[in-house]
Amino acid sequence: MQRTVIKFGLYSGICAAFLMFLMAYALNHGVPFDNAAYYGYAGMLISLVFVFLGVKAYRDKIQLGNITFGKAFQVGILITLISCLIYSLAWLLVYYTMMPDFMDRYAAYYKAKMEAQGLDAQIIATKTAELLKAKAMYENPLTNVAVTFTEPFPIGLMMTLLSALILRRRQE
C-alpha cells in the first residue's frame, strides 16, 4: 500500500503544484483575479483525479481486484494528505518568491470590486480589514501552510469517498 500511496500522492501533488505555478505565472502577467478561484479549484480537482486512479491501481494490482470501502478510503485519504502537503509547500514557494505582493494585489482587487458594486463604505472597510488580518496570518509560514492545506483537502475528501464507494468490490 505504501508504494501506491506515495506514488499517486506525488503524482497528484506535483500536478497540483504545476497548475498552481501556471496560475501564479498568469496572475503575474496580467490575467485578472476574476475567475482565478474557479481555475484554482478546477486545477485541484484535476490533480485529485489521482486519488481515484491510485485507489483503482491498488485494488486491481495489489488487492487482485477486491477492496473494501475502508481500505479504499484509507488509500485515498493518504494520497490526499500527500497531495495537500505538496500543494501547501508549493504555495509557500509561490507566495514568498513569485507573488510576495499577492495579498496586497488581491485586497486592492477585492476593494475595487466592492466599490464597483456600490457597497457601503463601512462594509468595504470591514472586508478590507479582514483581508489585512489574513495577510498578517500568511506571513507566518506554519499558518500559511495550515490555511492552504484546507483548500484542496475537502475536495480530496470527497474524491476519496467517491472513489471508495465506486471502487469497492468484495470477493465473489
Image (spheres, rainbow, N blue to C red):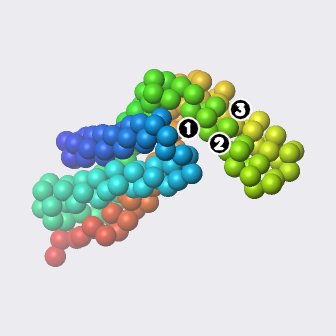
Residue at 45% x, 27% y is 98
Q: How far apart are the two marked residues, 3 and 1, measured between alpha carbons? A: 13 Å
For the residue labelled by badge 3, is the local secondary structure a helix, a strand or a loop? helix
Q: Residues within 10 Å of mark 2 (few under 14, many from 20)?
A: some
Are dots 2 and 1 in contact, CB under 8 Å? no
Circle 3/circle 2 CB separation < 8 Å = no
32 horizontally vs 126: left or right: left
Comparing labels 3 and 2, the label whose residue is closer to the camera? 2
Figure check: 55 above or below 33 = below
Image position of 55 (left or right of 20): left
- Name the kind of residue labelled 2 in the image: Tyr
Horizontal placement of 88 versus 9: left or right? right
Label 3 crowd (10 A; few <14 / some 14-19 / many >=20): few
Query: Horizontal and vertical percent for residue 125?
Result: 82, 40
The residue located at (22%, 60%) in the rendering is 56
Confirm whether residue 156 shows in the render.
no
User: First in sequence: mark 3 or mark 2?
Assistant: 2
Alpha carbon separation for disc pair 2 and 1: 21 Å
Q: Which element carries disc 1, helix, strand or loop?
A: helix
Seen from the viewer's position, the closer of residues 102 and 148 is 102
Residue situated furthest front in the rendering: 30
Circle number at residue 109: 2
Mark 3 belongs to which amino acid?
A: Lys
Which mark identifies residue 133? 3
